[in-house]
Amino acid sequence: MSRVTAEDVARRAGVSRSAVSRVFTPGASASRDTTERVRRAATELGYRHAGYRRRQPEQATIGLVVSNVENPFYAHATKCLSMALQARGFDTLLLVEMETVGTADAIVARCLDQGVAGLIVSSAATVSELARQCERFGIPAVFFNRLPNDAVSNCVTSNNFSGGRSVGEHLVATGHRRIAYLAGWEYASTQRDREAGLVAALREAGLEPFAREAGDFDYTLAQEATRRLFAGPALPDAVFVANDHMAFACMDVLRHELGLSVPGDVSVVGFDDVPLAAWPSYDLTTVTQPVAQMAEQAIEVLVAQIKAPDTAGRRIAIDGMLVLRGSTRDRTADN
C-alpha cells in the first residue's frame, strides 16, 4: 500500500496543498471549515503529516483520555496515573472527551499533532472506536478499567465480575432478599461485568434481582432511578449501585427525600471505594478498585507496547476487595 501524501488529503478535502500544510503547522492560520475538512480527510485516509514524530519511551509524552470528570473515581484515577507517569519521567497530555460526534477522530488527530508515544484511555463512550483508530494509526494504547469489543487491545481493569459477585454473596449472607440493582451506562464493560457478578451470586442462592433501574453513571439520573426503584408498594431491602458516584445520589434520595434510613430500612452498596465513600456522611460499603496498582500495570503494559509494537495485547484484571462500612447491616435476625 502506497504512503498517503498531503496531495491525497487535499484532493479528498477539496482544498489546496498549502491549506493542508497550514492545518498541520502550529501557529498557522486556517478556517474552522477547512480545518475540519482536512482533519476528516486525513483520518479517513490514514495520513500522518510530516511534523508527526514519536519520541522514545524515556522522552515520551503520554496521552491520558478521560471523560466523566465529575465522577470522583476518574478524578482519583487521573491523579494516580499522572503521578505515576511523572515519577517515571513522562510528560502527560490530558485529553478530556466530550459528548460530540467524531470524538475518537479528534483525539487521534490531537495525538498525531502532539507526537504522543501512546495513550491511556479511561473513557467509556468511544472506547471501541478509539481502539480501532489507534490500531489504524499505530498508536500504542492501554484501556484503563475498560474492555473494548475486541480480543487484541491492551486492557487493565479491576475484576468487575468477582467484585459484583462478592456484593451479591454478602447481601444474601446478611439476610437481604429483595436486592435491587442500579445500573450504570448499559454499554460499559464495567457495568455489564458488575451486574453479571451480582446476578450469578443471586441465582446461586435461588434469587433474582428484585428490581432494576439505570442511572448511566450520572448523579442526577441516578437520583431519578432511585425514585423509580422505590415508587412501588414493595420496596427493596438492599440496593447494589454500579459505582460510588451513583450510590451517593441513591443515599441522598433515600434519606433526604423519601425519609428512609440507611441501613435501617435499606442497605446500599457501591463500587470503586473513592475517598468520599469513607467520609462519615456516607460511610459506604463498597468494592475497592486497586487504582494505584492498576495505574502501574497500565504504564508497564504501555511502555512494553511502545518499545515493541508487535507485542501481543494483554488483558489484566486485578482483584478488588469488599470494604464493609455502615451503609449495610445484617438482617438475618429479621428473617
Image: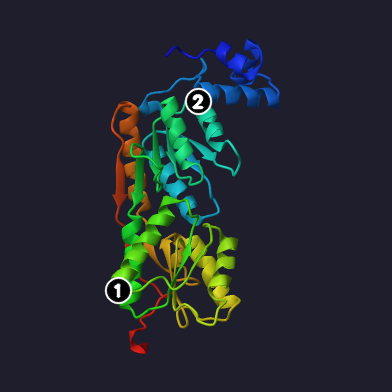
Q: Is residue 323 above or below residue 67?
A: below
Q: Observer-nearest residue: 308 or 90?
A: 308
Earlier-in-chain disc, 2 versus 1:
2
> Count of labels shown?
2
Question: Of the numbered discs in the image, which one, if any, rests on residue 225?
Answer: none
Q: Observer-nearest residue: 230 or 328?
A: 230
Picture quadrant of residue 196: bottom left
Secondary element at tag 2: helix
Residue type of the residue flagged with mark 1: Ala
Q: In the displayed structure, does residue 36 sit left or right of residue 335?
A: right
Q: Observer-nearest residue: 110 or 42?
A: 42
Locate the C terminus by quadrant.
bottom left
Question: Of the numbered discs in the image, which one, if any, rests on residue 112?
Answer: 2
Q: Is residue 49 above or below residue 304?
A: above
What residue would you read off at disc 1? 205
Q: Tell me residue 132's x, y (percent).
A: 44, 33
Q: In the displayed structure, does residue 78 sit left or right of residue 32?
A: left
Q: Nearer the viewer, mark 2 or mark 1?
A: 1
Residue 323: tell me if it is visible. no
The residue under the point 36% across, 65% down is 198
In space, the residues marked 2 and 1 are separated at their CA atoms by 52 Å
Residue type of the residue flagged with mark 2: Leu
The residue under the point 53% across, 50% down is 68
